[in-house]
Structures are given as C-alpha cells and as structure tokens.
Image (cartoon, rainbow, N blue to C red):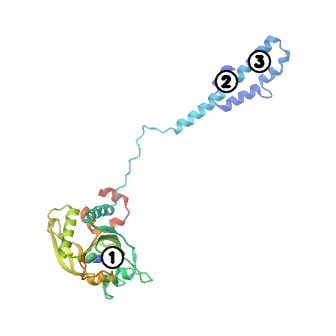
C-alpha cells in the first residue's frame, strides 16, 4: 500500500485509492471500525499504520500538486536562447530630416521659425500680398476655396504677413508649412510644402538677399563654389522680383526659388513704413529641396506612407 501510494502520479488516482481506503466502504474504515475487537498491541499498531497512511496520502497529494504546478511553469518559461525578433527602428521621414537641416541653417543666420494656419483668409493669402483680383492664384481652377471664401493656403508667403502683423520691425523670420494647389503629377502634389524667408530692416538690399541665399544653398547641398543664376521674374508681393537657379551636376540649371524685395504695398499693409524699412523675401519648395538632396524623382512618394520605401531609401 505504501509503495502503491508513492507510485501514483495523478490526483484522480490518488483520490480513488483514498476513497477505497478511507471511504464509507474503505478497507481502513472497516478495520478502524473493528478496532474495539483488537488487543492493545494490535490497536496501537493499527493507530500507527493509520497515521502513517494519512501522512503518505497527504505528502503524495502535495507532491503531485507541486509537480503539476512546475509543469505549468515550465511550459510558460521564456527560452532566452531563442533569437529575438529583428529590431525594427524607425527613421525620420526625409521631409522631417530636410526640415531640421534647413531650419538649423536658417536659424544660424538669425532667422526665427514661424508657422500659420493652413486655412487662410483672403487678406493673408492674397490681398495683403498685393495680389490683384485677376491674379491666376485666385482662380477656382488653381486653388482650393472654401464656401466661406477662405482658401487652403496656396503659399507660405501668408506667414510673412502674419509675422509682420504680430511683431515689430526689424524682423528676420522664416515660415514653414503645407501649401495647396490644384495640380498633380510626378513633380506636383495638391499638398506640398514651402519654406519662406523674410528679412526687414533699414538699408537691406538685393545683395543681402543673394548673399543669404547663396550661403544657405551652399550649406544645405554641401557645395563650396555654388553657382547661381538670377533671372527677372514677377510676383505681386515683391518688386523687383527674381528667380534663382542653381547649377547642378552635369551643368544643368535648376530653378530653386522665387524671391525679391518686398513690395512697398505689402509693407504698408502690415503697418511698416516703406520709406524707413525695406527687405527681401524668398520662397522655395521644401519637398523639392529634399528631392534634390536625396535624388528622388517623384514627389508623391513622400506622401504614400509606404514603410518599405522609407526603409529601403535609407535617407
Ligand atoms: N510665394 C511664391 C510662390 O509660391 C514664392 C516667393 C516667395 C516669391 C517670396 C517671392 C518671395 O511661388
């Protein structure tokens, strides 16, 4: 019996044997019931055996319960020798990365970063920027208008107006943000990004503009002897207006930005006296600068949210 108990491995079997021993019709129950007929020695022996058996059942029960517990724990155990999942670290989106480079350069030149609302009113996006009613940007074909006459900002130039309205001159700022136009192909997206610089002070000239743009492009692209081409252009909010091209690898000229001396009407619209203060503004496509730097040819890739592309591109 002792050996039998020790060899049992499940609680069910142990329970069955216990019942067969100590149950109503159990062998021990019968013997204990009969105890009154035994002599003293036999009685003492039965008592000892009874105590031993009970102890054996109890011990075996604890052992089996412990074994079941251990087996469960064993199953849950972490196998530290297994190779971990490959580490999947994110990278900064190339636009985010180029913004941090661009803003670091402009900030080192003393420009401070500004933002503004993406839904603009007519005043900040057009009127204050000296943009006449017949200008194509005001056309429903070119811009996204809301029913209340507001517009999805077509240019970050709106941010210069807000900056001049909220701060006094002299002012040296750059505005960053999303801009919207109705166009879509490999180099145009209906939503894109612009960055805009503005510097208003006394005695600011076109050569200050070109010097800052040259230093900026040279730092951003890491080209020492950068070659620029300045072409006359037209923007309602600058006079004179220019476009700045950059000589790229293979001697190709790339159009990089629009710029000019801030139009006196724009200064007046923002409460700045043009006889006392002048300045320049320049604006460029942030996406375009990132595409050039990373050798990309389709602007739409920036907005596809394709993690495989981001991982592969390795910016
Ligand atoms: N806002 C102009 C554009 O979107 C760029 C520009 C900015 C031109 C500042 C001159 C001065 O094309």
Q: Which of 16 and 111 is in front in this view?
A: 111
Residue 15 in the image, given as x and y percentages of width and height: 70, 30
**Foreground residue, 57 or 3?**
57
Ligand 1 falls in quadrant: bottom left
Nearer to me, 169 or 90: 169
| Other-residue count near label 3 (Cα within 10 Å), few / some / many at <14 / 14–19 / ≥20 | some
Q: Name the residue under label 1.
A: 164
Q: In which quarter of the image is the N terminus?
A: top right
Circle 2: element type: helix
Q: How far apart are marks 1 and 3 (CA)?
A: 104 Å
Residue 207 lies in what quarter of the image? bottom left
Q: Which of marks 1 and 3 is nearer the N terminus?
A: 3
Helix, strand or loop at mark 1: helix
Q: Give the spatial CA distance, label 2 vs label 3.
A: 18 Å
Q: Is mark 3 on a helix, strand or loop?
A: helix
- Determine whether label 1 and label 2 are within 8 Å by CB: no
Q: Which mark is residue 47?
A: 3
Question: N-terminal of the two: label 2 or label 3?
Answer: 2
What residue sits 66% from the left and 32% below the top?
A: 11
Residue extending furthest right? 37
- With respect to residue 173, does 238 lie above or below? below
**Residue 234 occupies quadrant:** bottom left
Please tell me which residue is depicted at 71% across the width and 20% down the height of the picture. 52
Q: Residue 191, image x and y in percent?
A: 36, 72
Q: Choose mark 1 or mark 2, whichever is in front.
A: 1
Residue, disc 2: 5
Q: Which of marks 1 and 2 is nearer the N terminus?
A: 2
Q: Badges 1 and 3: C-beta atoms under 8 Å apart?
A: no
């Amino acid at each position: 019996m002792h050996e039998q108990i020790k060899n049992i491995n499940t609680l069910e079997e142990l329970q069955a044997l216990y019942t067969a021993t100590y149950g109503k019709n159990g062998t021990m129950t019968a013997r204990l019931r009969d105890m009154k007929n035994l002599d003293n020695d036999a009685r003492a022996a039965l008592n000892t055996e009874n105590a031993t058996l009970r102890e054996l059942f109890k011990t075996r029960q604890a052992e089996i319960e412990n074994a079941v517990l251990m087996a469960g724990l064993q199953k849950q155990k972490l196998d530290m020798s297994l190779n971990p999942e490959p580490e999947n670290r994110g990278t900064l989106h190339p636009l985010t990365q180029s913004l941090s480079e661009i803003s670091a350069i402009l900030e080192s030149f003393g420009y401070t970063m500004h933002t503004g609302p993406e839904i603009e009113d007519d005043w900040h996006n057009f009127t204050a920027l000296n943009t006449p009613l017949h200008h194509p940007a005001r056309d429903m074909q070119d811009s996204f208008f809301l029913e209340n006459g507001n517009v999805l900002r077509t240019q970050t130039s709106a941010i210069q107006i807000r900056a001049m309205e909220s701060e006094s001159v002299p002012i040296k700022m750059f505005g960053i943000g999303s801009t919207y136009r109705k166009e879509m192909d490999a180099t145009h997206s209906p939503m894109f990004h612009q960055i805009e610089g503005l510097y208003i002070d006394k005695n600011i000239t076109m050569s200050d503009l070109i010097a800052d743009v040259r230093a900026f492009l040279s730092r951003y692209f890491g080209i020492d002897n950068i070659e620029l081409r300045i072409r006359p252009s037209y923007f309602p909010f600058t006079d004179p207006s220019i476009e700045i091209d950059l000589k790229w690898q293979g001697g190709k000229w790339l159009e990089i930005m629009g710029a000019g001396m801030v139009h006196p009407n724009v200064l007046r619209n923002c409460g700045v006296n043009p006889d006392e203060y002048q300045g320049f503004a320049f604006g460029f496509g942030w996406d375009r600068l990132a595409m050039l730097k990373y050798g990309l040819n389709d602007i739409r890739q920036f907005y596809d949210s394709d993690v495989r592309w981001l991982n592969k591109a390795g910016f």
